[in-house]
């Protein structure tokens, strides 16, 4: 589990507790998803490559750095959408590529319904965004798609995971770092994380 990073940041823990609360309304829920995503993305991007740059200040020249790599944010529809905006504000030159997968409720397997990735990869680092790493099926399928596309470096940024999801993703893609706010107890028999927070899509979009 060496590639699994569970945040120990107090702000993440505080916001996660509010996020789980069944009394948290969709507006507040979206704010919390956005804020936790920023904090986790901060931790997930600590190793981004830099190139030296010189900047002219009003007082003279200063040595600085620019990001060397183009970043792609890859939200898994639809729950991953809420993680995009905040991270995008931190890295406005990132590209956003949506992957649409739904979970077949009988087989619990992911079914792809949206993918508009261009033929040639346009980014060097992909952050796959999905708040819930449950069975791991969607995450594994998305990383499969991105590797097939030719993405060089891929990281998964989620919020809550079940041990089963972590196991599935690390088994299928042991090279992929996984950044999370927590790993919960288990999955229930319909593939929900326990204690989790319920349905992250419904709670963001008010459709529950
Ligand atoms: N997706 C969710 O929204 N919640 C879960 O607990 C598992 C998958």
Image (cartoon, rainbow, N blue to C red):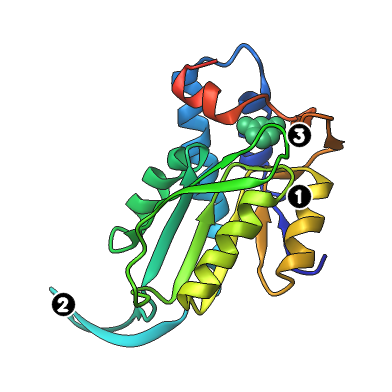
Marks 3 and 1, Cα distance to the nearest angstrom? 10 Å
In the rendering, at what x and y percent does residue 27 appear? Answer: 44, 20
Relative to 182, is 140 on the left or the right?
A: left
Most foreground residue, 56 or 19:
19
List the single residue furthest toward the right.
Answer: 185
In the rendering, at what x and y percent does residue 162 appear? Answer: 78, 43
In the rendering, at what x and y percent does residue 57 appear? Answer: 17, 75
Look at the numbered discs 3 and 1 and tell me whether their residues touch, using CB distance below 8 Å: no
Which quadrant of the figure contains the C terminus? Answer: top right
Which residue is denoted by mark 1 in the rendering?
165
Q: Is residue 143 visible?
A: yes
Eyeballing the image, is 200 above or below 144? above
> In what quadrant does ligand 1 lie?
top right
Eyeballing the image, is 135 above or below 62? above
Which residue is denoted by mark 2 in the rendering?
59
In the rendering, at what x and y percent does residue 49 appear? Answer: 46, 81
**Ligand 1 has an atom within 8 Å of the beta carbon of the residue at disc 3:** yes
SS label for mark 3: loop
Which quadrant of the figure contains the N terminus? Answer: bottom right
Query: Could you classify mark 2 by the number of other residues whose Cα lies within 10 Å: few (under 14), some (14-19), or many (20 or more)?
Result: few
Residue 191, numbered circle: 3
Q: Is residue 14 visible?
A: no
Relative to 124, is 145 on the left or the right?
A: right
SS label for mark 1: helix
Q: Quadrant for residue 13, please give it.
A: top right
Disc 3 or 2, which lies upstream in sequence? 2
Marks 2 and 1, Cα distance to the nearest angstrom? 52 Å
List the single residue furthest toward the left.
Answer: 58
Relative to 5, is 68 on the left or the right?
A: left
Residue 8, numbered circle: none
């Amino acid at each position: 589990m060496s590639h699994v990073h569970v945040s120990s940041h107090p702000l993440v823990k505080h916001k996660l507790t509010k996020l789980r609360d069944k009394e948290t309304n969709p507006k507040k829920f979206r704010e919390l998803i956005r804020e936790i995503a920023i904090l986790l993305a901060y931790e997930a991007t600590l190793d981004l490559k830099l190139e030296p740059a010189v900047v002219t200040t009003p007082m003279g020249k200063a040595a600085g750095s620019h990001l060397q790599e183009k970043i792609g944010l890859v939200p898994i529809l639809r729950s991953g959408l809420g993680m995009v905006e905040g991270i995008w504000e931190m890295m406005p030159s990132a590209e956003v590529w949506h992957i649409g997968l739904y979970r077949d409720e009988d087989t619990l397997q992911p079914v792809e319904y949206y993918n508009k990735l261009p033929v040639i990869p346009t980014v060097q680092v992909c952050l796959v965004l999905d708040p819930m790493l449950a069975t791991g099926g969607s995450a594994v399928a998305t990383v499969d798609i991105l590797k097939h596309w030719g993405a060089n470096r891929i990281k998964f940024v989620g919020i809550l995971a079940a041990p089963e999801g972590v196991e599935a993703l690390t088994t299928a893609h042991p090279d992929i770092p996984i950044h999370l706010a927590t790993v919960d107890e288990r999955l229930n028999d319909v593939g929900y994380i326990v204690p989790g927070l319920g349905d992250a899509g419904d709670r963001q979009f008010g459709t529950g």
